[in-house]
Image (spheres, rainbow, N blue to C red):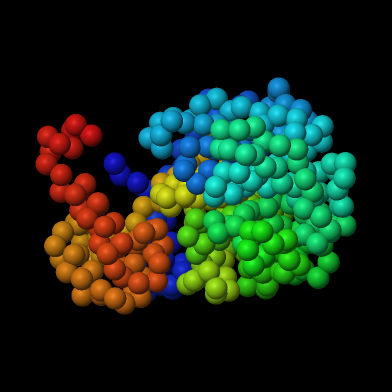
Amino acid sequence: MMFVGYVAAIVLGGANAKADFIFGEPVNLGQTVNSPVADYPSCLSADGLELYLASDRSGGHGRWDIWVAKRETTHDDWGIPMNLGPKVNSPTMDVEASVSVDGLELYFSSNNRAGGHGGSDIWVSRRQTKDGDWGDAVNLGPIVNSSSGDAAPWISTGGLELYFDSDRPDGFGSWDIWVSRRPTKDDPWGEPTNLGPLVNSSDDTGYPSVSSDGLLLLCSDTDTTRLHPGGFGSSDIWMSKRKTIADSWGEPVNLGPVVNGSRGDGLGRISPDGRTLYLCRPGPTYTGGTRSDIWQAPIIPIVDFNGDGNIDTSDLVMLIDSWGTDDTLYDTGPMPWGDGIVDIEDLKVFMEHWEKENMPQDQENDQ
């Protein structure tokens, strides 16, 4: 299959850089998941079998509710979304869920919910097992939540970082991304810190999400009234990288025109295996209103290292010659953006794509 992609590494590394991954053309998730009104992706469970979303569709408990669609395997289609129920969803607005890696904690934001500290607060609901019902929502308290707006939480894979956006004082824009940390999962969340002027700007920045390896941060510019410098629409998805989870985040770069269209795109979320980008964009019958759908786009590592249009032994030799280095051109595994070293993980990715490229015609037809 031919994908129209945007070379991520060119914007990350300058005009002379070569690609390490591209984004394929986004595809609408269809009418089983999306409704005739507005639907936004929130997160996926660690096993990739639950897709949490926010929607103002009918059948909920408030103006906006959190729903979940499930599937048996990662190769199956998503089922019909089910409402999380009144212990999570209130009569007001409940959105932007993020589930812990063990599937037992659900962080989300709720607007003007009784017991809150500001206009929008971050709450958490818990369950005993992954198949159990979610319990009563609990406010995270005044250390995390402020008297301003606090929203769009994202819990890291390790459970020790909680990202969110806020319009509290001492930021760089009207809305900024902040992070609260804790030493262990048994400790309370610490005082939030701003991600700083590289990530945040005088523009509004929000809707953070972090890849499962903790090395890629997605965010959106949230002021939809104007085109932002370097953007393609009224709202775009951007990404920031860091070498290790102990490092600071780098300057965000735009995901490009394949992902970001002229009408506005946002809420980028990466699947736990790093192979798929989920995002929100206007639906196929968009008429300028609030209707939006959930879309997905493949994330494709580039293993044609010499750019000759073939994946062959010459590319393999180039990879082996860079073994043990941090050359980003060959660092395409285990996630498409790499892990800082060319090693066996990159060889696995190369062999997967080499086998597809060189598969006998009769076997290819059986796929």
5 and 74: which one is in front?
74
Residue at 77%, 59% (x, y): give it: 144
Front residue of 134 and 187? 187
> Measured along the vertical axis of the image, is residue 326 above or below residue 232?
below
Seen in the image, is 65 located left or right of residue 283? right
- Where is residue 282 drawn, in percent x and y? 60, 38
Q: Quadrant of the N terminus?
A: top left
Residue at left 58%, top 38%? 129
* Observer able to see residue 56: no
- Whether 28 is drawn above or below 24: the answer is above
The quarter of the image holding the C terminus is top left
Residue 93: x and y in percent read 78, 38
Q: Position of residue 59 (x, y in %)?
A: 71, 22
- Occupied quadrant, residue 51: top right
Residue occupying image coordinates x 67% and y 65%:
181
Residue occupying the far bottom of the picture: 325
Task: Give x and y (percent) for residue 304.
Answer: 25, 60
Q: Dividing the picture into quarters, in which one does residue 347 lie?
A: bottom left
Specify whether 44 is left or right of 297. Answer: right
Q: Is residue 313 left or right of residue 192?
A: left
